[in-house]
Image (cartoon, rainbow, N blue to C red):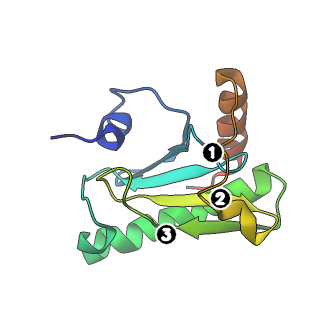
Amino acid sequence: MDTIFSKIAKGEIPSFKVAENDLCFAFLDIHPLAEGHTLVIPKQQTDYIFDIGDDLYQGLFLFAKKVAIALEKAVPCQRIGIAVVGLEVPHAHIHLVPLNTIYDIDFRKPKLQFTPEEFTTIAEKINRNYKG
């Protein structure tokens, strides 16, 4: 059965797409910890990130690196943090979170809210900097 992330990657559920290639898809988290908080997923549905085959795993992280570089250019921050939690949706995914302090990647903190127009603007800024 498809996950919400599989449906997003297939275009069945709308998202604020940041970047895409043949194997991976990146989109804004709609419950972000910071402006530009992006989720990076393999299009192939796999629940646990360490169950992904080696080639796809390497491709996923190389894609995430390119997205992180674009994100850092689009959103003022000191670094891009990375987290793989994997408990909330049964589809492997990487969180890319713009950081100015170590506490910016604390998943217990209140989530930010943006309008659809603000999400669209943020996604477009990241995408313009993406070199796929």
Marked residue nearer the N-terminal end (2 or 1): 1
Which quarter of the rendered picture does the C terminus lie within?
bottom right
Cα distance in 3D space between marks 2 and 1: 8 Å
Label 1 sits on residue = 32
* Residues at marks 3 and 1, CA–CA distance in whole angstroms: 22 Å
Residue at (46%, 67%) from the top-left corner?
84
> For the residue marked with disc 2, what is the amino acid?
Val
Please give left or right for residue 102 compared with residue 16 in the image. right
- Nearer the observer, 92 or 71: 92
What is the distance, in whole Å, between disc 3 and disc 2 at their CAs?
16 Å
Residue 77 can be seen, yes or no = yes
Q: Which mark is residue 130?
A: none
| Residue 44 horizontal side relative to residue 71, left or right | left
Q: Residue at (71%, 50%) from the top-left corner? A: 34
Question: Going 68% across and 55% down the picture, which residue do you hit?
Answer: 70
Residue that badge 2 annotates: 97
Instruction: Identify which residue, 73 or 102, lies in the foreground.
Output: 102
Locate residue 17, reporting x and y percent. 53, 37
Q: Which label was assigned to residue 62? A: 3
Sequence-wise first label, 3 or 1: 1
Front-most of 28 and 65?
Answer: 28
